[in-house]
Amino acid sequence: MDTEAIRTGKQKNLAGADLEDEDLSHTDLSRIILSGANLTGANLSGAKFTAARLDGANLMGCQVKGADLRANLLGANLMQADLSESDLRGANLRGANLMQANLTLTSLAGAFLSGANLMSVNLKGVDLRGADLRGANLSNANLQSANLFQADLRGAILSEANLEEADLREANLAGTNLTGANLLCAELIGANLNGTTLSGACLKGTILDENNL
């Protein structure tokens, strides 16, 4: 694959392309089409993907640290990818596989993550304000100190998740499974807990109000 043509913007439609292990770090890939492309193990650190199409792409094990990923990642495979410090605000990650990915200090405010697989993902300190996480699988995820203010978590699976000191104010947790979750000192003022499963959850120091339950 001619990566120079990609770097210079001469090649914009790379749907289905094989870019395994390629180095595209710090490249402006705005509006590029990589639908269904194979980017396994590629170095995409610091790259710019604004308004790019990565739907169905395979980014397993990629280095994407500090990248601008405000893109269409519908159904993409990001398993074990390093997405730390990346910008995913408003990104479309519906149905994406992010299992075991590193999302430390990533911004996911307003992102669309409904039905996404986030099992065992590191989301410590991540900004998820207003994110759509309906039906997402966040079991065993680390959400310590994460900002989930006004996030939509209806029907999400958060069993055994670490939500210590997380901000869940005004979040919609209706029908959410929080079995065995750690909610130590988490803030849930104004959160909707209708039909929420809390069996075995740690609620020590959790900040609730009288309208929660």
Image (cartoon, helix red, strand yellow):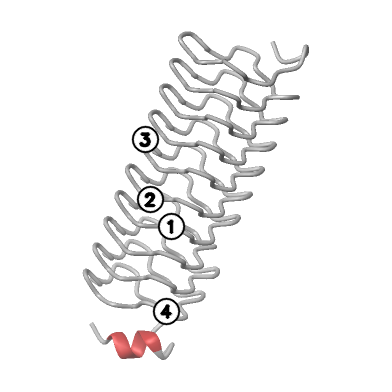
Please say if 134 is above or below 69. above
Mark nearest the camera among 3 and 2 is 2
**Which residue is at 64% across, 37% downward?**
151
Marks 1 and 4, the one that precedes in the sequence: 4
The Cα–Cα distance between marks 3 and 4, rounded to whole angstroms, is: 29 Å
Circle 4 residue:
26
Q: Nearer the viewer, residue 40 or 55?
A: 40
Circle 2 residue:
102
The Cα–Cα distance between marks 3 and 2, rounded to whole angstroms, is: 11 Å
Give me the disc on residue 84.
Answer: 1
**Which residue is at 49% across, 61% downward?**
86
**Which residue is at 58% across, 30% downward?**
153
**Element at badge 4?**
loop
Circle 3 residue:
119
Please say if 70 is above or below 121. below
Please say if 142 is above or below 67. above
The Cα–Cα distance between marks 2 and 4, rounded to whole angstroms, is: 19 Å
Q: Specify the amino acid type for callout 3.
A: Met
Q: Specify the amino acid type for callout 4.
A: His
